[in-house]
Image (cartoon, helix red, strand yellow):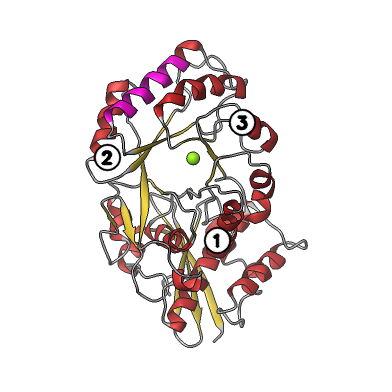
């Protein structure tokens, strides 16, 4: 079998990037790349596709390495290029699974679980009161999720965004909001909080210390992610579990974070960190330090379902992110459904990816088609 064509499409209003890989024997693979400027164009750039055309798509890891070599003399890349590579890698696994008649999770080593727990990233709306957050939390919990997440982004009243510092009043507000949410939820429903890299260690530690008796699942990205030493200091200074990783690429990007145990939980985004096998490698690396895996995810249903194969196949999986609870396009893009039932996605037994893109729905949502529907 040989790869004969790679194409992509950028959707709207969510800028989801889908890639399609065609083979000479008729098997077609679908993947999704983390969205970002130009990612759909990089996926079909000749410097990338020329490394794949004519190759055997079943040699997934070799194709992955060839793509990196094609885009960089060093064979190592990050950013939008790695996002495009990740989407193509997912499509190759879809082809491989279909070719041998088994689901991707089987090719990744088999399953630890039939259903993958999904956590809903809640958006509280314009009302910033603790009561509004608590009401939203109860509403999402009632829809079957056993884990949810809220953001504690800087308030408009913040004095100065550049020094990353926050006032005592703002700290008190975050503590009131998170306490109200925690108290509203069933004790068995997990609550995670995302700080989006916005704060100085000295200030977010005041917040993390105040959260310590709330039993949070984690506090995510408390400080900017690029300084692993500073992240380790924060992690080692609080009993509130720290989660990070959505901005790191490939296992090499996770090496220092995991080896220095600078987080309690790691959150790679497989649609940009290198795809499914690289996700499995990062998970296994984290498992050597007994660290759970909670993948970051803002993909549509194709990328989300692709990630469930890794989540099923690694022992240390904790929960997979989900952002699109009432987004009809998320549900309509695949013919199967609903995919999420009682806060879980069943991985199923179908060969390859296991869900079918509704190309009519995708075509109607297409913003720029680079050969995808031809
Ligand atoms: Mg996050």
* Residue drawn 41% across the image and 31% down it: 215
Farthest residue toward the top? Answer: 168
The quadrant the N terminus occupies is: bottom right
Q: Which mark is residue 280?
A: 1
Residue at 28% across, 67% down: 335
Q: Which region of the structure is painted magenta?
A: 171-184
Q: Nearer the viewer, mark 2 or mark 3?
A: 3
Q: How many marks?
A: 3
- Which of the two discs, 1 and 2, sits closer to the camera? 1
Q: Which quarter of the rendering shows the C terminus?
A: bottom left
As drawn, is 273 to the left or to the right of 124? right
Disc marking residue 187: none
Q: Dot 2: what SS?
A: helix
**Would you name the residue on which mark 3 appears?**
236
Question: What residue sits 47% from the left and 63% below the top?
Answer: 313
Q: Quadrant of residue 62?
A: bottom right
Residue occupied by mark 2: 140
Q: Does residue 302 appear left or right of residue 234 in this picture?
A: left
């Amino acid at each position: 079998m040989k790869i004969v064509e790679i194409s992509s499409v950028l959707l709207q209003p969510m800028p989801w990037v889908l890639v399609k890989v065609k083979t000479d024997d008729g098997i077609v693979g679908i993947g999704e790349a983390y969205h970002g400027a130009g990612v759909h164009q990089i996926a079909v750039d000749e410097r990338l596709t020329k490394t794949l055309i004519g190759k055997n798509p079943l040699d997934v890891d070799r194709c992955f390495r060839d793509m990196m070599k094609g885009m960089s003399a060093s064979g190592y890349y990050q950013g939008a290029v790695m996002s495009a590579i990740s989407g193509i890698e997912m499509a190759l696994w879809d082809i491989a699974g279909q070719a041998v008649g088994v689901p991707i999770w089987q090719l990744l080593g088999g399953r630890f679980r039939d259903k993958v727990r999904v956590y809903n990233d809640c958006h509280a709306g314009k009302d910033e009161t603790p009561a509004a957050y608590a009401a939203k939390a109860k509403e999402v919990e009632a829809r079957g999720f056993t884990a949810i997440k809220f953001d504690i982004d800087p308030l408009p009243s913040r004095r100065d965004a550049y020094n990353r510092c926050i006032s005592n009043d703002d700290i008190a507000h975050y503590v009131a909001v998170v306490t109200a949410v925690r108290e509203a939820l069933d004790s068995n429903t997990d609550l995670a909080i995302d700080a989006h890299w916005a704060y100085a260690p000295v200030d977010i530690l005041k917040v993390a210390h105040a959260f310590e008796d709330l039993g949070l699942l984690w506090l995510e990205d408390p400080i900017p992610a690029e300084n692993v030493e500073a992240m380790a200091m924060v992690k080692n200074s609080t009993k509130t579990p720290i989660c990070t990783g959505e901005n790191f690429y490939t296992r090499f990007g996770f090496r220092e974070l995991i080896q220095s145990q600078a987080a309690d939980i790691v959150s790679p985004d497989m649609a940009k960190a290198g795809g499914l096998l690289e996700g499995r490698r990062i998970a296994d690396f984290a498992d050597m330090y007994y660290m759970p895996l909670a993948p970051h995810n803002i993909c549509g249903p194709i990328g989300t379902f692709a990630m469930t194969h890794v989540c099923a196949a690694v022992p240390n999986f904790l929960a997979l992110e989900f952002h699109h609870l009432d987004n009809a396009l998320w549900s309509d893009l695949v013919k199967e459904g609903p995919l999420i039932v009682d806060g879980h996605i069943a991985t199923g037994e179908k060969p390859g990816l296991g869900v079918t893109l509704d190309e009519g729905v995708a075509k109607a949502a297409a913003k720029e088609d680079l050969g995808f529907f031809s």
